[in-house]
Image (cartoon, rainbow, N blue to C red):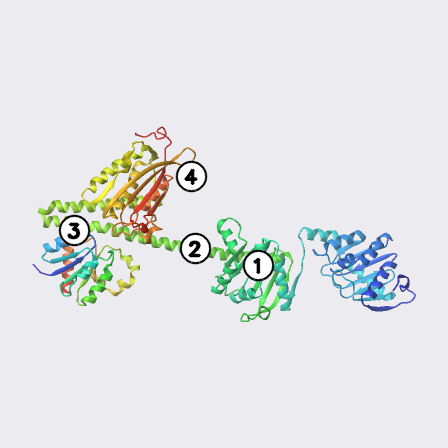
Amino acid sequence: MNNNRILVVDDEPDLTKVSTLALEYHGFKVDTFNDPQEALSKFKPGSYDLIILDIKMPKMDGFELYHEIKKKDNNAKVCFLTASELYYEEFRNEEYRALDRNLFIRKPIDNEDLVKQINKMIKK
Amino acid sequence: MPATDTPTIDSERTQVLHGFEKTTEAIIGFLHTAEDSMNICADHTWPSVAMGVEVFKKELYELKERNVRSRFVTDITKYNIKYCKELMQISELRHLDGLKGNFAISEKGYTASATLQEAALLQEVIYSNTRAILDQQRYMFETLWSKAKPAEQKIREIEEGVDFGKTEIIQSPRKILELFINMIKSAKSETVLMLPTINAFLREERIGAIELLKKSATEHNVNVRIITPSNNDVEKILQNTLPVAMIKEQQENRKKEKRFEVQRSNIQFKETAMTTVTIVVVDKRESLVIEKTDDSKENFIEAIGLSTYSNSEPTVMSYLSIFEGLWRQAKLYEELKEANEQLLIHDKMQKEFINVASHEMKTPTQAILGTSGLLQYYPERKDELIEIIQRNAKRLQTLIANILDVTRIESQTLILNKEGFNIRDVISSLIEDYKDRTKNSNIEIINIINNNNNPIFVEADKDRIIQVLSNLLSNAIKFTNQGQISINLSEKKKDDNHWEDGRKEVIVSVTDTGSGINSEIFTRLFSKFASKSYQGTGLGLFICKSIIQAHGGRIWAENKDARENKSGATITFSLPGATDINTANGDN
């Protein structure tokens, strides 16, 4: 049991459910939100070892949420779990350029690989 | 000077006469006394003087009556041709290109005048009866006469358009300006104008040339075409120049030839000198090429240098073909630019499509991959997990079907398997199906069409119509958290010419009390990727529209009036009805 705390924000309920079950099985403590605005309003600095954000979400996309979370907690570790295509970067070039490429985990990914990636990021 | 006082050979003299009265008297006397021969050589204005001034005309006709042998040489042009034809009644007439000076010799005397003015009396005339001068001038006349060509030939050339015109260089800027304006004013069918710089355009505007061109286009039906470099100032002037009525006419009837067209010369040739002259060609008959010497000058007269005027066909046609070549090039450039823009839009849409489609594929794939892995961790939650897998597999299936449909539509290989069927039955059973699916939600589906059992036949692809209806119902459910969804079915005779006589139109509408259609996407609702939902590719209504249109029907959307405090949307489509059960020969 690792007791690491993870926040997952994704507008797809099936995906947050899968992430929760998979991560809990590997000993993580998991909070999830399907509504990014609700996730932001309930966010408390220092509560998570890693925050995993979807990018394409209604009302507030993953990049906006990233900046808002960083405003509240500059030390928060945030990464993205996204189904967007690589050249979607063309349209969102500025956001992508400002961020470390290693922060992006691409869907689809199986549970074991996801856990490996998360552990790697937490240790960084 | 009465005719009887006409000098004779006996008293040889040479004198210069001044003033209308004296010159007229002298000439009349000269003509009147001729008995054997009358040889006249005079410039292009002479025919109008000879036939346009009554006293001269009378004397000339009398020459014929007295059987005096007359020979006339002049410069026959399209402007004096009618006088020349008259002169041919009196005398043999020949033509010499660009003839200058005027003189006449009879067996008795010689007269000459330096300048002639059109159809007017003469200011100054030289008269002589000196033998030596007569011999000398007779020799000169014979020389010119032998070089001249018969009037009949020249007249034919002019009338058939083989006018060997003139080409001349004009140095006076004022004369150039006057000629330029007169040429534009005189245009009967076509004016083309090519300008070298933006400043040249602005100078032409200042002298009123652009306004005149507009006038000749609107009032005299002259086709006006201009090639000019352009900037905001030029565009502003052009916008004001094109009268509203004309723009409207052009829009209403695109095929109608445009009378005032402007091409922007975006291509500049640095190597060639195309940028230093203004070229104007009128009616394929006259050209004027104006050199520009100082483009910084605001004033037309200060900016221009030498000009070349021509009404000689080879020159005029050459300038016209230079214009036509550049015109075509400018047009092609416009078309190329347009095509390139379309290509970029298409390219962007393709990328957008792949991005949306792949996002929509990866999301359920992630759910399926993750959930199937969870089956090993939580075998006891198998039922719940399999439900997630099935739901996402269905989502993938729908997406794949949609993408295949779009591919069929765009490659125009959508094939309809039409049959006659009762659409009332189809809708009823579909509604029952959806009622079943929504029984645990806050949505009530109302089956209005059950109130009437009259069959309504259509001839259509049943599966495709079910696909459209399912799509509309799913959309209605998606955007209605709580409320009602109703389906309406009606049939009406077409009163316009949309379908042939006797055919009916079947109208189906799906109405919900949901959030209504977002105004941002309303106008492009039926195009690809028009979606405000974060679940969905925005392909559904595009496919619906394509299917309905392939059947020859229409589809449209309406929002409920927000002012009446109602929300919700109605999507309606129409299909051509089958006239009766016989045409609807399907499986009823």
Residue at which label 3 appears: B370
Q: CA distance from mark 3 to mark 2?
A: 47 Å
Residue A12 in the image: state x and y as whole percent. 20, 52
Residue at which label 4 appears: B498
Image mark for residue B213? 1
Quick one: label 2, few (<14), some, or many (20+) residues within 10 Å?
few
Q: Specify the quadrant that holds the N terminus of chain B.
A: bottom right
Which quadrant of the view contains residue B282?
Answer: bottom right
Amino acid type of the residue tagged 2 in the rendering: Glu
Q: CA distance from mark 3 to mark 1?
A: 74 Å
Instruction: Determine if marks 3 and 1 fall on one subunit.
Output: yes
Q: CA distance from mark 2 to mark 4?
A: 34 Å
Provide the secondary structure element on which disc 3 rests: helix
Provide the secondary structure element on which disc 1 rests: helix
Instruction: Determine if marks 1 and 2 fall on one subunit.
Output: yes
In primary-sequence order, the first of circles 2 and 4 is: 2
